[in-house]
Image: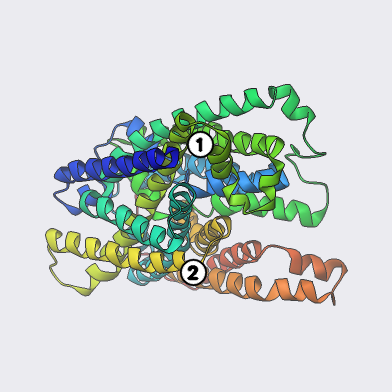
């Protein structure tokens, strides 16, 4: 009976989300409305949308399970790296890009480096989202499986269709307004559950006293390999998601530059504080119900809530969890669809109308949903899926973006070389180095090389390619100023 009521609440919540998306669709008349909500959002709406960018499956399920198993050092990537990214978005990209009449990061690459750089960056950016979206779909399917016993395959199909429908009709207007509503649900739901759990374990003092040795250690031991991995964890989302389209669309949707910048700073603070709540919840669950660690650690919090709390608490938690995942997934689906339409399809047509471009973007959204839905059917680890996505953009797009904004000598040749070289080196190191380490044939300094995360080598290669390539390139025909 209780599970039936909870499932009914979830269904009602999903229907309300669809209704909000449908209502927001009335504001979508142009591609600018679809992609950036017509640049008319107040600071608080933008801050909530930015906060919701990653506050989804990885933070609530993936990061929580990592924290329960490995302590504070296991979650440097998220939430700390994610909060860093939002801060850097305000410091580095909001002001110089806001007044440009562009819809995507790739438009900036075209203005600064030429059409070839635009297309290359788009081809790199679009697939970087697939793992990220798949992770959110997997998480939604896990929730439906936990609550209603729904087979995960059907859960993936239902969740993919749901997110597609309300993003398809309303674009960024739907994303922003639903993010605002869902952010309120996230904060209330997690706060209620956190307070309840802390009381059950006997308060903060008992939590700290019961922690294993070094569980709350923030800085790594002074060993080269551990320091390098710690830095890489900060970089994965902290730098890797700065050049991501979903961040860009939210930042640029603000009504003015000031709102854009302060929305970044506010969302960074919101993320760092609110994201602590699922970590605390998971730690308390670890203390109270250690047997949950023996199963799928991604299910620690959902299993604990279902088995050891009443209906009201279940409604609070699962409402917050679904809100978090939907917020992340909708914006993530919209981003690659926008890039496909604006930077890959549009250059193929002459005199394409705004209405036609909007139609192409919506068709692209369907294609993205189909691809990511199939990925979600074949992959299950949320934390790994999200990490893959951020690393992809870090090694290929970060250096060209920052160099294009702040280094006058950067050229198109350097940008393209940076994108491709960083990506290829990362792929090579990612596939080759783990096997060399496991072989046991190497030691000393050579072993340190192979144990260095692949994203470090990819980023270094991207930087070197930009520097070398820019000495061979020609001056750019246009300026971003």
Tell which of 203 and 309 is nearer to you.
Answer: 309
Q: Secondary structure at mark 1?
A: helix
The spot of residue 478 in percent (x, y) is 32, 60
Do we see residue 51 in this rendering?
no
- Whole-percent x, y for residue 258 in the image: 35, 32
The residue that appears at 45% across and 29% down in the rendered structure is: 312
**Res 50 quadrant in image:** top left
| Residue at figure coordinates x 79%, y 65% from the top left | 448
Relative depth, front residue between 53 and 140: 140
Q: Is residue 198 visible?
A: yes
Q: Residue at x 51, y 36 (%)?
A: 271
Q: In the rendering, at what x and y percent does residue 462 appear?
A: 56, 66
**Is residue 400 toward the left or the right of residue 301 in the image?**
left
Q: In front: mark 2 or mark 1?
A: 2
Q: Would residue 34 appear left or right of 448 to someone viewing this image?
A: left
Query: Toward which corner of the image does residue 199 lie, by quadrant?
Result: top right
Looking at the figure, which quarter contains the N terminus?
top left
Residue designated by label 1: 271
Q: In the figure, 341 relative to 98: above or below?
A: below
Q: Is residue 76 left or right of residue 474?
A: right
Disc 2 crowd rating (10 Å Cα; few below 14, some 14-19, many 20+) is few
Nearer-the-camera pick, 377 or 218: 377
Question: What's the colour scheme?
Answer: rainbow
Can you tell which quarter of the image residue 133 is in? bottom left
Mark on residue 378? 2
Which of the two residues, 3 or 16, is positioned nearer the viewer here? 3
Q: Secondary structure at mark 2?
A: helix
Q: Can you tell which mark lies on residue 411?
A: none
- The percent coordinates of residue 372 (x first, y second) are 40, 65
Q: Residue at x 47, y 62 (%)?
A: 131
Local packing at callout 1 (Cα closer than 10 Å; few below 14, some 14-19, many 20+) is many
Q: Earlier in the sequence, mark 2 or mark 1?
A: 1
């Amino acid at each position: 009976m209780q599970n039936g009521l909870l499932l009914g609440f979830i269904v009602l919540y999903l229907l309300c989300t669809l209704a909000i998306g449908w209502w927001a669709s009335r504001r979508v008349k142009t591609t600018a409305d679809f992609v950036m909500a017509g640049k008319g959002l107040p600071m608080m709406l933008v801050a909530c949308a930015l906060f919701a960018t990653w506050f989804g499956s990885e933070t609530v399920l993936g990061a929580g399970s990592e924290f329960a198993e490995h302590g504070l050092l296991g979650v440097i990537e998220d939430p700390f790296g994610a909060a860093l990214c939002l801060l850097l978005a305000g410091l580095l990209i909001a002001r110089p890009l806001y007044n440009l009449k562009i819809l995507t990061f790739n438009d900036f690459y075209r203005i600064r480096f030429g059409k070839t750089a635009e297309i290359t960056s788009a081809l790199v950016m679009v697939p970087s989202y697939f793992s990220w979206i798949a992770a959110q779909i997997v998480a939604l399917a896990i929730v439906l499986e936990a609550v209603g016993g729904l087979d995960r395959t059907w859960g993936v199909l239902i969740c993919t269709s749901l997110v597609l429908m309300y993003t398809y009709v309303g674009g960024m207007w739907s994303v922003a307004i639903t993010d605002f509503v869902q952010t309120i649900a996230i904060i209330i739901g997690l706060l209620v559950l956190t307070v309840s759990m802390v009381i059950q374990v006997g308060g903060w003092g008992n939590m700290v006293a019961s922690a294993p040795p070094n569980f709350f250690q923030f800085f790594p031991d002074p060993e080269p390999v551990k320091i390098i991995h710690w830095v890489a964890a900060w970089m994965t989302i902290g730098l890797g998601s700065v050049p991501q389209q979903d961040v860009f669309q939210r930042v640029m949707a603000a009504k003015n530059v000031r709102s854009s910048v302060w929305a970044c700073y506010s969302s960074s603070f919101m993320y760092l504080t609110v994201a602590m709540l699922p970590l605390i919840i998971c730690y308390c669950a670890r203390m109270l119900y250690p047997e949950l660690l023996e199963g799928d650690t991604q299910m620690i919090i959902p299993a604990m809530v279902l088995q050891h709390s009443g209906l009201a608490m279940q409604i609070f938690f699962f409402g917050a969890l679904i809100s978090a995942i939907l917020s992340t997934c909708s914006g993530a689906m919209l981003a690659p669809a926008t890039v496909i339409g604006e930077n890959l399809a549009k250059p193929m047509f002459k005199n394409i109308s705004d209405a036609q471009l909007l139609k192409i973007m919506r068709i692209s959204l369907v294609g993205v949903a189909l691809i990511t839905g199939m990925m979600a059917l074949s992959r299950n680890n949320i934390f790994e899926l999200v990490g893959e996505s951020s690393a992809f953009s870090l090694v290929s797009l970060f250096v060209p973006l920052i160099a294009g904004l702040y280094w006058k000598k950067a050229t198109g040749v350097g940008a393209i070389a940076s994108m491709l070289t960083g990506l290829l080196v990362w792929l090579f190191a990612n596939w080759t180095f783990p096997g060399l380490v496991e072989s046991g044939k190497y030691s000393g300094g050579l072993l340190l090389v192979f144990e260095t995360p692949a994203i470090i080598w990819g980023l270094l290669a991207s930087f070197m390619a930009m520097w070398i390539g820019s000495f061979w390139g020609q001056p750019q025909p246009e300026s971003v100023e």
